[in-house]
Image: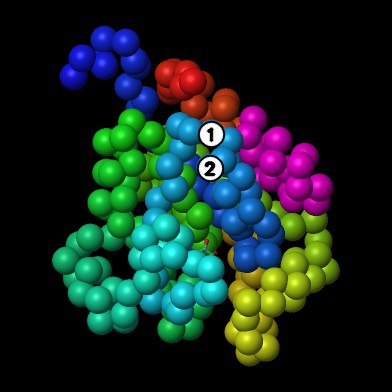
Amino acid sequence: MEHDVFLNIPPKKIIVITAPSGAGKSTMVKKLMQQRIDLAFSISLTTRDKREGEIHGKHYYFVTHNEFKDRVGKGELVEHEEVYPGQFYGTLKSEIERIWSERKIALFDMDVKGAETIKKAYGNDALVIFIAPPDKETLVRRLTNRNTESKDSLKKRIKKAEQELSYQTKFDKVVVNGDFDIAFMNVKNVITNFLKQGAVAAHH
Ligand code: 5GP
């Protein structure tokens, strides 16, 4: 293509933001997307119910259990996890290809197990950042304030978040999210350093 003369082609890189739920991960991902045009959000497949305000094809691809199973069977997913009992989530190969073909860096919001799989699959081409809550009380408060879940579901999420905290040593960087602005700045710096290593072209 003509453009290639003028632009460096970014390497095929992946950035994963992972955390226990309630650590402030999705706010982080949203803000990154607003500020860095070289990142593109990888839209996952999920069987969970759509929440108010969510859009199919923007936040997730919402599918039935049968469709999910079918697509796993066809080998369309790089990784998939039953993140909560009966709720499946997975990364589509086609999403990564779409993003890379747009010359962008794929940005994922993923549970700790999925993040571990991606790190194993992509090695140094993947940067996994673990967002840690400052303490357990903050985590529980954030989950409770979110108010999108039933009581039962909230309990499950708190228990799970506690287990997930133990995964943090497996990843490239841990950023504590006490003060959001400071944490966000740290995440941005980690990403900038990672992308520099690959001599990624500057985007304007
Ligand atoms: P939520 O239901 O709150 O949107 O997401 C629940 C959890 O599933 C979050 O920890 C989120 O990061 C994770 N998740 C979202 N998409 C994927 C995916 O494609 N794979 C995996 N393994 N986890 C995902």
- Whether the magenta-drawn stretch holds residue 110 is answered as no
Along the line of sight, the residue nearer the viewer: 161 or 179: 179
The residue type indicated by label 2 comes to: Met
The residue type indicated by label 1 comes to: Arg
- Local secondary structure at mark 1: loop
Asked if the residue at tag 1 contacts the one at tag 2, i.e. Cβ–Cβ closer than 8 Å, the answer is yes
- Local secondary structure at mark 2: helix
Give me the C-alpha separation between circle 2 and circle 1: 6 Å
Q: Can I make out residue 197 in this image? A: no
Residue for badge 1: 36
User: Which residue appears at 50% of the width and 78% of the height?
Assistant: 84
In the image, 102: left or right of 54? left
Q: Which residues are magenta?
A: 172-189
Q: Quadrant of residue 76?
A: bottom left
Classify 10 Å Cα crowding around label 1: few (below 14), some (14-19), many (20 and above).
few
Which corner quadrant holds the N terminus?
A: top left
User: Which residue appears at 57% of the width and 27% of the height?
Assistant: 192
Count of labels shown? 2
- Whether the magenta-drawn stretch holds residue 178 is answered as yes
